[in-house]
Amino acid sequence: MSTTPPGGPDPGTGQNPYGQSPYGQSPYGQNPYGQAPYGQPAYGPPPTHPAVPPGYELASRGLDPWGRPLLRYAGWWSRVAATLVDTVLYLVAIIPLVIGIILATPSTREDPLTGAIVETAPAPDPELGFTLILIGLPLYVGLVLWNACYRQGVTGASVGKQVLRIRVMREADGLPQGFWASLGRLFLHGIVDGWCYLGYLWPIWDSKKQTFTDKIMSTVVVASR
């Protein structure tokens, strides 16, 4: 009596009684593990973009590193309002200095014959006046340096800019300028932008809302997120 060898064909049907040949197509169908092991792995999240430093932005184009719109330049009125808030802050700090100058300064007039300045009345209170000057001058200068240079240099926003939710950043990387660059920006605003006030008005029609100082320092003022 003949027997069919294991894995051999059935004498009656000519077919393997155990299904397809174990050496042919896999009986399990498609690979349950996804694509071939040498291709893209089927497990884990899809590849992501490389890590980007915090605050990095392509400010010059208004796009993030993947070409998506990101920046919204601050309008002219927002910048003016922020400047007014900072100015009020400085005026409060300068009050002791102004009072001290008034108290320490005598009344004078010009002699119509000689043109000399003649004192007409002594200073109201020279000692108190000089004391207030010694207090008020460092207070005023220190507040300006802290607000416009240190605070804005580190965070991107002075008190006024924070109130209006705008900030200054470098075009190249979107980071704050730092103290020394902010100090240079402060001087340039008075020298460059103050000439005929044209620099202060330039953001009205500029595509990036920049003053002359912004263009020199490669900075932009944007709306905070």
Image (cartoon, helix red, strand yellow):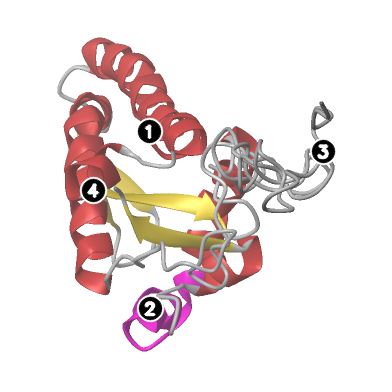
In this rendering, the label closer to the viewer, 1 or 4 = 4
Q: Are marks 3 and 1 in contact (CB under 8 Å)?
A: no
* Disc 1 versus disc 2: nearer the observer: 2
Question: Of the residues under marks 4 and 3, which one precedes in the sequence?
Answer: 3
| Circle 4 residue | 165
Q: Percent from the top left, x then y, of residue 174?
A: 55, 50
Q: Indicate the quadrant where residue 135 lies.
A: top left
Extreme front residue here? 1
Q: Nearer the viewer, residue 190 or 125?
A: 190
The CA distance from mark 4 to mark 3 is 82 Å
Tags 2 and 3 touching, CB below 8 Å? no
Lower sequence index among marks 1 and 4: 1
Horizontal and vertical percent position of residue 116? 40, 55
Q: In 3D space, how far apart are the residues under numbered discs 1 and 4 (Cα atoms)?
A: 15 Å
Q: Quadrant of residue 207?
A: bottom left
Q: Which residue is mark 1?
A: 147
Q: What's the amino acid at mark 2?
A: Pro
Residue type at mark 1?
A: Asn
162 within the magenta span: no
Q: Which residue is mark 2?
A: 203
Crowd rating for badge 4 (residues with CA inside 10 Å; few <14, some 14–19, many 20+): some
Disc 3 marks which amino acid?
Answer: Gly
Residue tagged by mark 3? Answer: 8
Q: Amino acid at mark 4?
A: Arg
Residue at screen point 50% across, 67% down: 63
Q: Tell me the SS state at disc 2.
A: helix
At a point 48% along the width and 69% down the height, the residue shown is: 62
Depth check: give the residue in front, 202 or 93: 202
Q: Is residue 52 left or right of residue 193?
A: right
Helix, strand or loop under label 1? helix
Instruction: Judge the density around disc 1: few (<14), some (14-19), many (≥20) Cα neighbours within 10 Å.
Output: some
User: Under tag 3, what secondary structure?
Assistant: loop
